[in-house]
Image: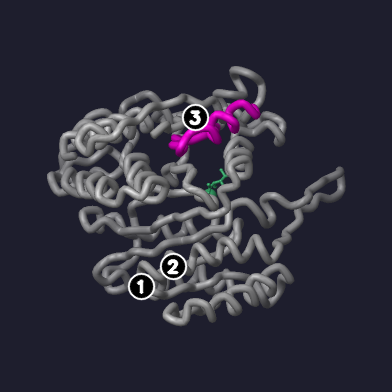
Amino acid sequence: MKIALVKGDGIGPDIINEAVKVLDKVAAKYNFEVTYEEVLAGGCSIDKIGEPLPQSSIDQCLSCDSVLLGAVGGPKWDNVDSSLRPEKALLGLRAGMNLFCNLRPAIMYPQLSAACPLKDEIIGDGLDIMVVRELTGGIYYGKRGSDENSAFDTLSYTVSEIERIVKKAFEIAMVRDKKLTSVDKANILNSSQLWRSVVERMAKDYPEVKVNHLYVDNAAMQLVRDPNQFDVIVTTNMFGDILSDEASQITGSIGMLPSASLGSGTLGMYEPIHGSAPDIAGKDLANPIATILSVAMMLRYSFNMEKEAKAIEEAVGNVLDLNYRTGDIFTKGMIKVGTKEMGNLIAQAI
Ligand code: IPM
Ligand code: MG
């Protein structure tokens, strides 16, 4: 397999290096071959060539079997023209590879349950929610404009854009607890009314899946009131952006969570949900686990290698069971390790 590495900015290179270490170990153990190709995108690309995502980078990603991304952006580029911000690299990669389906699992690691901000009686025996976010449409990609006195962004969805993401969500619900919550704002937005009608129509094809609809404000509230009512959540680009941050924070494991962006084929882009943390870049302080778990998602979703994916997830669990922690998840009595040491430990556990 040929993997595009978009190391990006801040801690991006630190965490990608550890993910590569672990993937190489898995490849050696399970007998497959991996090659890598580094791709320029984000703030580092602005510095080097004056733009966040050259077409050649998109082409390079498209020519690989999958993409592993560290993080892009940082305060250094806060004042560049909005069309040149590092975040444009992310949006460009998503659209350029047609990755319309963003999977963001919000899982609580029992070893880290002390970091969960909700009361024990609310959490019960854990948390495992899958947020399925539409990623290449909606208000992120609509027509926009501004002058001195006003500014606008456009939110629109077509039936086929809704159908393809809702189909993925149903398929995922079928292999989980068969419960799907669709989140919208159908009491106000036309696009949400369309969204809801498509979900209702498609629900007939999946009679085993229990479907409900929530308005986004209510969903935000329910996520902290009783998160275990959720199994799979499917929603639009912007609502998914917001709710996936909320869902990840209630697990207490925000530095630990991976994500996958998928299209209709096997090419995907995999990245941690956290940002580029420029303040700790290059200092051997970052937690590489979310990126390492993103490699597990990559093996599962792009290469259908379930056994190999599980091996990574179990190795992470084993290292946590042995009480090794990076600074962000460190608590008293644990053993503090740096980025590289954490990568080494997980590779060894493979
Ligand atoms: C995310 C991020 C991005 C988004 C930003 C950086 C453009 O918040 O991946 O959730 O809004 O999609
Ligand atoms: Mg976000």
Which amino acid does the dot numbered 3 rest on? Gly
Side (left or right) of 284 relative to 59: left
How far across and how far down the image is residue 156, in percent?
A: 73, 60
Instruction: Residue 200: name its quadrant.
Output: bottom right
Q: Which mark is residue 8?
A: 3
Is disc 1 surrounded by few (<14), some (14 to 19) or many (20+) residues within 10 Å?
few
Q: Which colour scheme is used?
A: one colour
Nearest the viewer among 30 and 143 is 30
Give the residue number, with chain letter if any, for mark 1.
Answer: 177
Give the residue number, with chain letter if any, for mark 2.
Answer: 232
Disc 3, disc 2: CB below 8 Å? Answer: no
Q: Does the magenta stretch include residue 71?
A: yes
Nearest the viewer among 36 and 125 is 36
Which amino acid does the dot numbered 2 rest on? Val
How far across and how far down the image is residue 311, in percent?
A: 22, 46
Disc 1, disc 3: CB below 8 Å? Answer: no
Disc 1, disc 2: CB below 8 Å? Answer: yes
Which of label 1 and label 3 is nearer to you? 1
Nearest the viewer among 36 and 255 is 36
Side (left or right) of 321 relative to 173: left
For marks 1 and 2, give the CA distance.
Answer: 8 Å
Which amino acid does the dot numbered 1 rest on? Asp
Which of label 3 and label 2 is nearer to you? 2
In the image, residue 74 above or below residue 322 = above
The stretch of residues the image draws in magenta is: 54-74
Q: Earlier in the sequence, mark 3 or mark 2?
A: 3
